[in-house]
Image: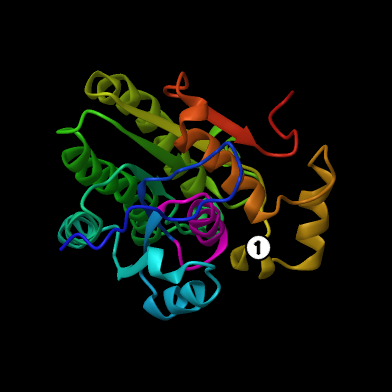
Amino acid sequence: MNTRSSSPHPDSSEFSLAPCVTIVTGAGSGIGKAIAKRFCSAGSYVTLADINHSNLELVISEMETPEHVMPITVDVTSKESVDNMVKKTVERWGTLDVLVCSAGITSDTPFLELSLEEWEQMLRTNLTGTFLCCKAALVAMQERKQGSIVNIASVAGKKGGGFFGTSHYAASKGGVLAFTRALAREAIRMGIRVNGICPGPTETPLIAKMDSQRRRQLTDSIPIGRFAEADEIARAALFLASNQSSYCVGECLAVDGGILMD
């Protein structure tokens, strides 16, 4: 049943997403949560997708218009789960306009200690998960020949990791970058734009677990001298999802405080 009303109430920003329906994966925390909140404020109806349902309930409690969001538990490594996410979104809101793939994991394991299981889990979540979500979304979008997909990669995908022990993470995010550019060439023929974002170190629950010495070392490598706020990444995602970026196709925007400018 389509329960979307005719007029959500976006903010006064020119980056309006009204009327629009968005899926945000990884919406339960960190960058995904910030994107979901920012998109909802911009007028979009949002499916909040995350593997942790209790996190989603907390996100909804912080929304100004909770009636414009729908939580759904999803495992992005499962085709069945991802297909169900898209199906439920279209049933609830009547369509799908935007997908933001923000679900992902990270870990720090020196290469010689890296197990095949950990390597495969990283690629399965970050890269295969992005593939599954994009494919399901494109199937839903192609009939209308319009839509926008934003994949969250990382500066690690371009730089080859931010610090010691992230070879598997860098490989997964480098794959997301290459996949995003390749998919953009195909999807634009359907009228669907695909772009990506390469965030630098961002204040998220994952970063909060970092020890102080490592945090200082990483901060010293950032020309702007600080970590990003999650909403700074969300505003970039809003730009790429909205019509304000109508001529951007296959772009992988670095939002990294200057890390990649050399």
Residue type, label 1: Ile
Number of numbered discs:
1
In the rendered structure, the answer to whether residue 206 lies left or right of residue 77 reads right
Q: Residue at x 77, y 59 (%)?
A: 215
Q: Nearer the viewer, residue 28 or 112?
A: 28
Quick check: is 33 in the magenta stretch?
yes
Measured from the top left, where is residue 180 in percent x and y?
38, 31
Measured from the top left, where is residue 262 in percent x and y?
74, 23
The boundaries of the magenta stretch are 27-44
Q: Nearer the viewer, residue 64 or 183?
A: 64
Query: Is residue 212 depicted above or below 222 in this figure?
Result: below
Q: Residue at x 14, y 33 (%)?
A: 143
Residue bearing the label numbered 1: 207
Q: Residue at x 61, y 42 (%)?
A: 13
Residue 260's quadrant in the figure?
top right
Residue 188's quadrant in the figure?
top left
Measured from the top left, where is residue 96 in percent x and y?
27, 46
Q: State whether residue 251 appears in this view.
A: no
Query: Is residue 231 depicted above or below 249 in this figure?
Result: below
Query: Is residue 194 depicted above or below 42 in this figure?
Result: above
